[in-house]
């Protein structure tokens, strides 16, 4: 089985190089971490990239690349904080709506990418999308200003 996988990998690597890619094959550790509490599933995947950094991604309840870390301890610390925050969120009556909203945001990103890759989109439509995003960001900032902060162990990264 390993020989078959290796042969397939070499074949795909050759195809990518023929397309003009610079391909580096890295054998690395891949970790899948999952939690379930209060009927919410939270899962992560992390691996070591070519720069010897640990790249962490949350994959459930919605996909979100988090960032690269210098060591595995930082990954575990970040997961720990993230889990505390999700446990905190489960106390909210709106948790299902929040998760659904974030899943819809991810779907919108995927649909927008398909739109621009497959269609010649007008400048007017692009400007309208930009206006919608500006309004959404303003609403997020306004909501933050009007809401009670409930988590203090770490500061938000984007607010």
Image (tube, helix red, strand yellow):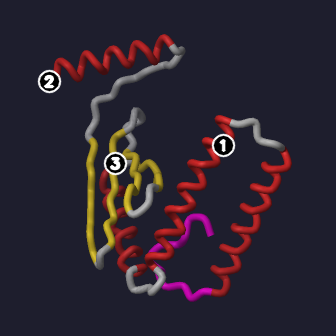
Give percent across and percent down for residue 3.
17, 18
- Decide: is 139 above or below 30: below
Mark 3 Cα-neighbour bin, 10 Å: few <14, some 14–19, many ≥20: many
Name the residue tied to disc 2. 1
- Tell me if residue 79 comes above or below residue 121 in the rendering: below
Is residue 156 shown in magenta? yes
Task: Give neighbour class at mark 1: few <14, some 14-19, many 20+ (Cα, 10 Å).
Answer: few
User: What residue did someone put label 1 on?
Assistant: 115
Q: Main secondary structure of the magenta part?
A: loop
Q: CA distance from mark 1 to mark 2?
A: 40 Å
Q: How many marks?
A: 3
Q: In the rendered view of the protein, which quadrant contains the N terminus? A: top left
Can you tell which mark lies on residue 65? none
- Mark nearer the N terminus (1 vs 3): 3
The residues tagged by marks 2 and 3 sit, at their Cα atoms, a distance apart of 25 Å
Please give the label number shown on residue 46: 3
- CB within 8 Å, label 2 to label 3: no
Mark sitting earlier along the chain (1/2): 2
Asked where in the image residue 82 lies, by quadrant, the reply is: bottom left
Give residue 68's position: percent from left, percent from top.
44, 48
Tell me where residue 101 appears, x and y as whole percent.
54, 68
Q: Nearer the viewer's eye, disc 2 or disc 3?
A: 2
Q: Which residue: 53% across, 72% down?
A: 155
Q: Which residues are magenta?
A: 147-159
Q: Quick one: SS at disc 1?
A: helix
Vertical position of residue 32 compared to residue 29: above or below: below
Contact flag, marks 1 and 2 (Cβ < 8 Å) = no
State the residue in front, 55 or 143: 143
CA distance for labels 1 and 3: 30 Å
Instruction: Judge from the rendering whether residue 155 lies leftward or rightward of residue 91; answer left or right.
Output: right
Foreground disc of the pair 1, 3 = 1
Q: Is residue 13 left or right of residue 27?
A: right
């Amino acid at each position: 089985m390993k020989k078959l996988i290796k042969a397939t990998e070499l074949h795909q690597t050759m195809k990518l190089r023929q397309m003009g890619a610079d391909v580096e094959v890295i054998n690395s550790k891949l970790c899948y971490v999952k939690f379930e509490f209060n009927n919410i599933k939270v899962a992560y995947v992390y691996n070591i990239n070519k720069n010897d950094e640990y790249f962490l991604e949350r994959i459930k309840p919605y996909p979100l690349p988090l960032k690269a870390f210098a060591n595995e301890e930082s990954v575990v610390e970040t997961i720990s904080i993230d889990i505390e925050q999700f446990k905190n969120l489960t106390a909210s009556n709106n948790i299902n709506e929040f998760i659904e909203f974030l899943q819809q945001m991810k779907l919108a990103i995927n649909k927008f990418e398909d739109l621009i890759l497959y269609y010649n989109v007008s400048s007017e439509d692009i400007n309208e999308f930009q206006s919608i995003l500006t309004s959404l960001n303003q609403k997020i900032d306004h909501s933050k200003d009007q809401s009670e902060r409930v988590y203090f162990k770490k500061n938000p990264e984007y607010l």
